[in-house]
Amino acid sequence: MILLTPLCPAGDDGALLPDARGVARCARCGAYICPQASLEAEGWVCALCDALNPYSHGGNWRYIPDRDAEASPPEVSHSTIEAAILSGPDAVDLDCRPLAVYLVDIGGPGPAVAAACDAIARSLEALPEEALFVLATLAKADQVSIYVAGGSSGSATTPKPLQHLAEGGGRTQASWVLSATVKADILASLEALADAHRGVGESESELACDVHFAAASLLELLEANAEYVAAARSPEGLDGFQSARASPLACARFLLFQLRLPTAGQGAAVALLPTQAEGSSGPGIGADYFTGESESPAAGEGATCPVPASVDLSPRLWEQASSRGRRIGFAAEAELAYAGVAAAAAEAGMVIDVFSFGERYLGLHAVGRLADGSGGRLFHYAADEPGAASLLARVCKFLVMRGT
């Protein structure tokens, strides 16, 4: 995760402090600086509109791992940033069809779901014919619906022309390959899905959200269909990938749209009860979450230590925790769970890009491990920012173009 913010001189001593403007953005189109931006002597060049943005003060920047970090972030040099921009997963030279995979949380607020659908549609414009397309939707915990470009007649639960990929049913019958007709129909389906959510309002689904389960399930299904994917992507099939020492999922792009706070499963957020004693350490947050209070002898008699509270408060987890004086955090196991999925994706050669569209930064440092560990990037856009939805769409299209 790379967020870069300019430093400005403050006070008579000339000390450099983070600029109140926060993360650097392009003066022309508003895009955030990102690892795809190029660094020139005069300033950084926007990856989307190629505008030159002068450095605020000699190219001095500060690295911020996440907004909730309490420690002072380390300062980095111009060369360090340049190295980070140039870094990425090892290049694989393969003559194969592109594979684009999308996972969108349709239980999020209506405007966010609509923006995600618009972004997917915009990125589809950059996909050539014969590319492979997979779309997964997350509505509630332990339920992920996966569709491929199959040209089916559709039904009340299966939007035309997407074909539902049942467990074990995608190896022989389902076609994942786009064509001009199928692409046009998919664009129409995405537009209809977006229109259905535009007037829904800001409320989220009452159902729990398990982002880790959805991402892990989708990756497992892709790996289970590796032989079919290889045959569809390369004329030489699986032999072609093996001769190149690559996975059938190599160079695939996985775009994940996180629109709610994860509140279920291994990657869930938890509400913590307040700590009354200064500096006291409460019990660790394990895999088994529970509700209650605990007293620690080390903290003094009667002191309340932070303990995990229920994770099934979606979508009112934030509001309920705040009203009860609690804070929200992630167990260490949550970050490790996301890191495990990212490692599996990286081993298969797949890059995961995570998009957060909302007002909260909470949880991005945990879910962002999906991007960090696979060579992808984490992007956050505030829903109330003018042009945020349009910027999200342009970034998605740009990433898919780079992958093709």
Image: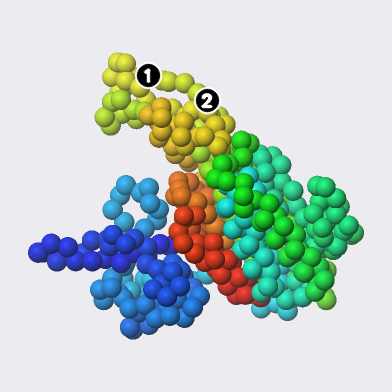
Q: Amino acid at mark 2?
A: Phe
Image coordinates of residue 388 in percent, x first then y, are 50, 62
Please, what secondary structure does the residue beneath circle 1 have? loop
Report how far apart the C-alphas of labels 2 and 1 lie in the structure. 15 Å
Q: Position of residue 273 (x, y in %)?
A: 41, 27
Q: In the rendered view, would you say 272 is above or below 391?
A: above
* Residue 266 visible in rendering: no
Q: Could you tell me which secondary element the residue under label 2 belongs to?
A: loop
Q: Residues within 10 Å of mark 2 (few under 14, many from 20)?
A: some
Residue positioned 45% across, 48% down in the render: 360
Where residue 66 sits in the image (x, y, percent)?
Answer: 40, 53
Q: What amino acid does circle 1 point to? A: Glu
Q: Which mark is on residue 295?
A: 1
Left or right, 274 with reference to 130? left
Up/down of 13 relative to 302, above or below: below
- The residue that disc 2 covers is 290
Q: Along the horizontal axis of the image, is 317 left or right of 66? A: right
Depth check: give the residue in front, 153 or 294.
Answer: 153
Quadrant of residue 29 within the rendered picture? bottom left
